[in-house]
């Protein structure tokens, strides 16, 4: 029987690994973190903006999926170029994820979102980092990522990874993520189109 050939994804993605696993001596990103911040530190992660500062700017910080309008989140996904998700499947994914998101205090709708899935002890993978296009450039993506990483670190998770489009790799580096640290390469399994038709 002939083995089916795997089809690579069209979009290139970079594998990034959280720098929190590496020692400060070998990790230049830990040395670049701001020494002090108005936001304070949570679980060893420096917050650049506090929850109260975000609130004063009209954004409510949320750390669970409770109250998250999945249809509105799907709209944000579409506006940033992500595929829309089946709402029931997205709800199930959220039940198994750590989340951090910001809601507009005026509308309650999500304006920034990030989630991570993993074993809750050793490993986590960050997914679906999005910011409403009209709110980009305000530091909201950084705010949700700092809070998500802080929660994972608070739980003792030391291996945090993500996949990123090449155009946004620069966003993650100041947050402590490094490309292919110590020569580690990320790999992903993709079923061939032929296999997908058979299952």
Image (cartoon, rainbow, N blue to C red):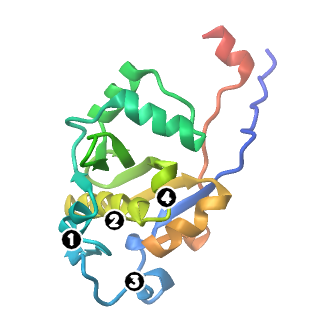
Separation (CA) of disc 3 from disc 1: 14 Å
Give whichever of discs 2 and 1 has the lower sequence position.
Answer: 1
Please say if 31 is above or below 85.
Answer: below
Residues at circles 2 and 1 in contact by the CB criterion of under 8 Å: yes
Q: Quadrant of the N terminus?
A: top right
- Assign a secondary structure to mark 1: strand
Separation (CA) of disc 2 from disc 1: 9 Å
Q: Can residue 78 be seen here?
A: yes
Separation (CA) of disc 1 from disc 4: 24 Å
Quadrant position of residue 53: bottom left
Mark toward the viewer: 2 or 4: 4
Mark toward the viewer: 1 or 4: 4
Total numbered circles: 4
Give whichever of discs 2 and 3 has the lower sequence position.
Answer: 3
Residue that mark 1 sits on: 42
Residue at 43% x, 51% y is: 126
Residue that mark 4 sits on: 136
- Assign a secondary structure to mark 3: loop
Residues at circles 3 and 1 in contact by the CB criterion of under 8 Å: no
Query: Residue 15 in the image: x percent, y percent?
Result: 58, 57
Please say if 96 is above or below 145.
Answer: above
Residue at 54% x, 61% y is: 16
Q: Furthest residue to the front?
A: 106
């Amino acid at each position: 029987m002939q083995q089916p050939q795997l089809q690579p994804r069209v979009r290139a993605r970079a594998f990034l690994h959280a720098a929190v696993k590496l020692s400060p001596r070998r990790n230049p990103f830990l040395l670049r973190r701001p020494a002090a911040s108005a936001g304070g530190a949570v679980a060893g992660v420096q917050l650049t903006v506090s929850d109260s500062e975000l609130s004063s700017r009209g954004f409510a910080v949320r750390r669970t999926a409770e109250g998250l309008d999945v249809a509105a989140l799907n709209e944000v996904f579409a506006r940033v170029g992500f595929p829309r998700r089946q709402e029931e499947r997205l709800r199930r994914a959220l039940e198994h994820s750590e989340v951090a998101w910001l809601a507009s205090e005026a509308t309650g709708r999500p304006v920034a979102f990030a989630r991570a899935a993993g074993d809750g002890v050793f490993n986590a993978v960050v997914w679906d980092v999005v910011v409403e296009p009209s709110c980009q450039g305000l530091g909201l993506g950084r705010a949700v990522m700092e809070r998500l990483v802080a929660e994972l670190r608070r739980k003792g998770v030391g291996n945090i990874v993500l996949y990123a489009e090449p155009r946004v790799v620069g966003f993650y580096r100041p947050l402590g993520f490094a490309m292919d640290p110590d020569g580690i390469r990320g790999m992903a399994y993709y079923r061939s189109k032929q296999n997908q038709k058979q299952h």
